[in-house]
Image (cartoon, coloured by chain):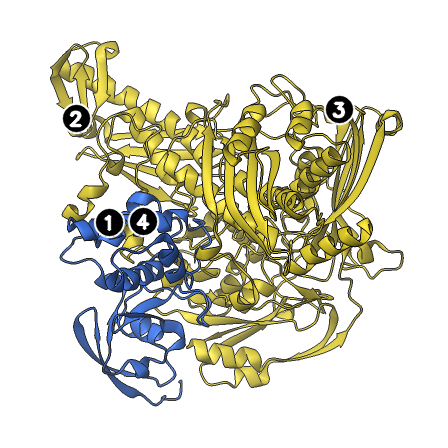
Chain colours: A blue, B yellow
Amino acid sequence: MLPRTRRVRVALDVNGRRHVLQIPPHHTLLDLLRAHLGLLGTKESCGEGVCGACTVLLDGRPINACVMLGASAHGRSVTTVEGLSQDGTLHPLQLAFVECGAIQCGYCTPGMLLSAKALLDVCPAPSDEQIRQSLSGNLCRCTGFVKIIDAVRLAARRLAAGSG
Amino acid sequence: MAAATDGLRSPAGPLIGRSVPRLDGFHKATGRFAYGTDVVVAGMLHGRVARSPYPHARIRAIDTSAALATPGVVAVVTGRDLPERRFGALVKDETVLAVDVVRYVGQPVAAVAALAVEAAIEAAARIAVEYDPLPAVDTPEAALRAGAPLVHEAWTTYVAHPQLIRAGNVCGAATIAKGDPSRGLADADHVFEDVFTTEPVHQAYLEPRVAIAAWEPPGVLTVHSNTQLPFEAQTVLADLLGIPPGRVRVITTGIGGAFGGKLRVGVEHIAAVLAQRVGRPVRIVLTMAEEFAAAYPRHAMRITLRTGVRRDGTIVAKEAHALLDAGAFGGSSPGLPSVATLVLAGPYRIPHLSIEATSVYTHKQNFGSYRAPTGPQCAFAVESQMDMIARRLRLDPLEFRLRNIVRDGDEGPSGQVFGKVSLEAALRKAAAAIGWGHRRQPHHGKGLACSWWTTTGGPSAVYARLHADGTATLATGCAEIGTGALTAVAQIFADDLGLPVENVTLISADTLATPYDHGAQGSRSTFAVGNAARAAAADIRRQVLGLAAEVLEARVSDLGLRDGRVYVRGTPSRQVELGDVVRLAMQRHGGLVSSGTFVAPATPYKTDCVSGHFYPAFHAPSFHAHAAEVVVDPETGTVRALRYVVAQDVGKAINPRLIEGQIEGGVVQGLGQALRERIAYQGAYPLVHNFSDYALPRCGDVPQITSILIEEPSDSGPHGARGVGEPPIITPPAAIANAVHDAVGARVTDLPLSPERVLRAMRGRLEGAA
C-alpha cells in the first residue's frame, strides 16, 4: 500500500462551476484539472512552464498550469478549453481555428486558444504584432503559426462585428 | 452539438481541390480529442525507466533491492531478466533493456512498475547500478579510426538484411556510381570542393511518447500508443515477446506531433515486458528529458562535395562523401544512406557521379527519421555549393540552376526516368515572388534553393462500409499524425460516392481491427491510402448502383450518385436515398461492404549503378524551389527571416489549405534547423533536457510565408496527387544560408547559422579582404 499523503483543501471556480477538493499539496493546477476534475483538454508537455501547452486563464490571465500549485488556485477562478464553448456553440476563436487550418496535431490548441482569448479580452482589435507577441509563450511544432495568426485575426473581426 | 458544427459543414459538390475543414478539428478545438497522454486503462500501474548515465560502460552489477522495497512498487525488471531477443528494422542490434553494456547516455537499463507515478519515479532512482566506464566514440570520424572501440563487438552475430553493407562501426552504406567521375572531374574547367556539417535536431513533438500495455483474454497483448507505425510495433512486440503477431493489438491513440519521431518502437516494448511481468496493465509516459536523450532525432552529417563544372556553367561531374552519425543502434540509420545519395546528387543533369553515404555507429542516442530524413542536411550542402559555384563563376544562381536542372524525360541519379518535371516553373515562380534580382537594402539578402523528394510507396488497404443512415465508415491502418491526411482521404472517398465529407467516419490504426498499412510516414498517407480508398469506393459504388438500378428500374450506366442519393441522369426526380439502398442490401446479403488495396508501382532504376540501396529511386517525385529574404544584424550576426516563398509541385492539391499547413509548418521547422536548433553535445553527453535548452521557433520568429502550389499530376497518385508533407522542410537551411551570403557576403557551411558562426564568417571575409 502507498503511504497516505497529506491533503489540502482547495475551493475554486472552474469554467463557472464551484469545486471543493482535497488534493495532495504537491499537485499542480494541471494535476488538479486533469486528475481531480477529469478535465483532459488542458495538455502537459514540457512540465516546466516553457511550452504553453497547459495554458489556462486564472482570473482571466493566461498562466502555465504545470508550474502553479493546485493549492495556490484556492479562491481563484479558472477557465480551461472546456469552458470556451457555451451551450453547444463554439467560441469564435474555436470556430476560426478549425476553419483557418490553425489546428494540425492539436496538442497546443487548447493552450493557444486560451492565450488568444486572454489577448482578445483586453485588446479586441489586435495588430499582427500584438497577436504574435501574445502567442509567443505557446509552442506549436506543426503549423508554423501562420494560420494560427490568421485565425485569431478572423475571430477578432467576427467578435467585433458581433456575429460570433 | 449539431448547431455548433453547422459552420464547419462543406457545401455540396465536388470535394477534390476544396479546402474542407479537417474532420477532427471540432474535437481538437474543444479539448475532447484523446491523445496518448489522455488514455488510461482500469487497474493500470505506472512504469518508469532507469537509464544509463554513461555513453559507454560495462554494467558490473545491478542492485534492485532498494527499488523493490519502495512503497507501492510492484516489479523491477533488468535486461538480465528478459530473454535475449534483439530488434531493429534492418539490423537487429538492440535489446529492450541494456545487457552487460550500455552504449549511450539515456539507454534503458531497468524499468519499474508501481501503483503511483511518484513511487515509480522514486524506485527508478533507487536502482543501484555499478558501472565501469569505457572509452566512447562520439563522432563517425572517431568511430572509423583504426583501433576505435567497436560500439557492437558482436556485430557479426546480429541478424541483418542480406543487402545491408556493414563493417565494424559501419551499420549501413550506399553508393551511386555513374559514368566516369575521375575523367569528368579531369575534363572540367573548374573543380570545387567544399565541406558542410550539420548538428542533430529534434522533432520536438509536444506530446511525449506514451504506451499502455495490457494483456487481455484470450492472451492478446493490447498496446495503446501514440505510434506512427502500429503494424511495425506489432511485429517488433511479437518478436520480442515470442508471441504470434495476430495476438498483438496495437492501437494508435491521438498523436500530439510526430514528424518521424514516433515511427520506431520507443516505449511500447518496455511497457509490454513490465505488463507481462506483473500481469496488469502498465502505462509509461516519457519525460521531456527522456525525449531529448533517447529518441530518434535527425542525424548530424558531414558532407564533402567535389563538383566539376565547365566554364559555361554546365556541371559535368560530382563526387560526394557523406557520414551520418547513427548513434548506438541502427533504427532507421542503415537504410538512410540510400536516401541521402539521391538528395546529394540533386535535381541536376550530371553525367558522371560518384556518391557514397555511410551510417556509422557512435555512443550516442539512435538518430533516426525526422521528416525527410537526410534531406535538409544533404540539400544544405548541395544547394549551398550551387550558390558558391555560381558566385565563383560570376553566374546568377538562378541561371546556373536553370542551366543544370533535370527536365521532362531526363534520367535521375539512379537511372529512373522522369515524366513531367516542374522544377523550372518552381524556380521561376519562387524567384519572381521574392523579387529576385531586384535592388536590396544594406544587410538584406535573398537566397534560392531547390530540391526533390519522394512519395514513399508501400501498400495500403482499407475497408469501407455504408450504413442505413447514408453515412459511411472507412477503416484504414494508417494513423492520423496531425497532417490532416486522413481528412484528404475522406474527401477522396466521399467524392467518389457523392457523399458529404462529414458523413465519412474514419476508423484508423488498429492492428487487429483495421487492414494493413505501410503507415503514416514518407509523405505517403494521402497518396497511398487515398488510392486504396478510391478502390474501395469503386467497388461499393458498383454494388450501390447495381441495387439502385433494380429499385429505379434503370440501367446502371444511366445512374449517378450525388448528395447521398442515387438518381437517374436526365430525370433527377427518379432517385433513391443511399440509405434505402443500404437497407435493401442488408436484407439481401448483410449490407454494403468493400475493401480496396493499393501498392505503389515500382519505379524502374538501373541496378548496376547503385549498391546498398533500400530506396533506389524516388517514387512520384516532387520538385520544389524555395526563396528567402533575410536581414542580418552586422553587430550581432543575428539572422531574421523576413519573407519566405515555397513553390512546390504537389501533383494535385486535394485540400489546398491542408497543404499550405504542411508547407508553413515544414518551413518553420526548417528555419529552426537553419538558424538555431541543435541538440548540443559535450563529447557523447547530450546537453539538452527540455524545450528550455532547445531553441524552437516561436510565433514572433515566423516570416511571411507564401505557398505556390504547382499541380503537375503524378502517374499514380489519387487524382494525380504527390506526397507533400516532407518536402517543405528540406530546403530552408540552404535557402537561408544563401540569403545570408547575399546579405553580408559571409558563407556559413555549418548548421545552424548561429549568430557567432555568422559573425565569424563575416570577420573571416573582412580579414580575407584585408
Check chain identity for marks 1 and 4: say if they share one.
yes
Q: Residues within 10 Å of mark 3 (few under 14, many from 20)?
A: some
C-alpha distance separating marks 1 and 2: 50 Å
Question: In front: B534, or B3?
Answer: B3
> Can you tell which quarter of the image residue B5 is in?
top left
What amino acid is at disc 1? Answer: Arg
Q: Amino acid at mark 2?
A: Leu
Q: Return the chain for callout 3.
A: B
Against B412, is B67 above or below?
below
Relative to B380, does residue B176 appear above or below in the rendering? Answer: above
Mark closest to the chain's N terminus, 3 or 2: 3
Determine the CA span between mark 3 and mark 1. 54 Å
Q: Is residue A11 left or right of residue B431?
A: left
- CA separation, marks 3 and 2? 68 Å
Callout 3 secondary element: loop
Q: Amino acid at mark 3?
A: Thr
Q: Which residue is mark 4?
A: A151
Q: Dot 1: few (<14), some (14–19), or many (≥20) neighbours within 10 Å?
A: some
Amino acid beneath label 4: Ala
Mark carried by residue B314: 3
Residue of label 1: A157
Q: Nearer the viewer, residue B757 or B554?
A: B757
Marks 3 and 1 belong to one chain: no
State the image coordinates of residue B233 (x, y, percent, origin top left).
52, 51
Residue B584, label in figure: 2
Q: Using a 10 Å C-alpha cutoff, classify the residue at mark 2 as few (fewer than 14 neighbours), some (14 to 19) or many (20 or more).
A: some
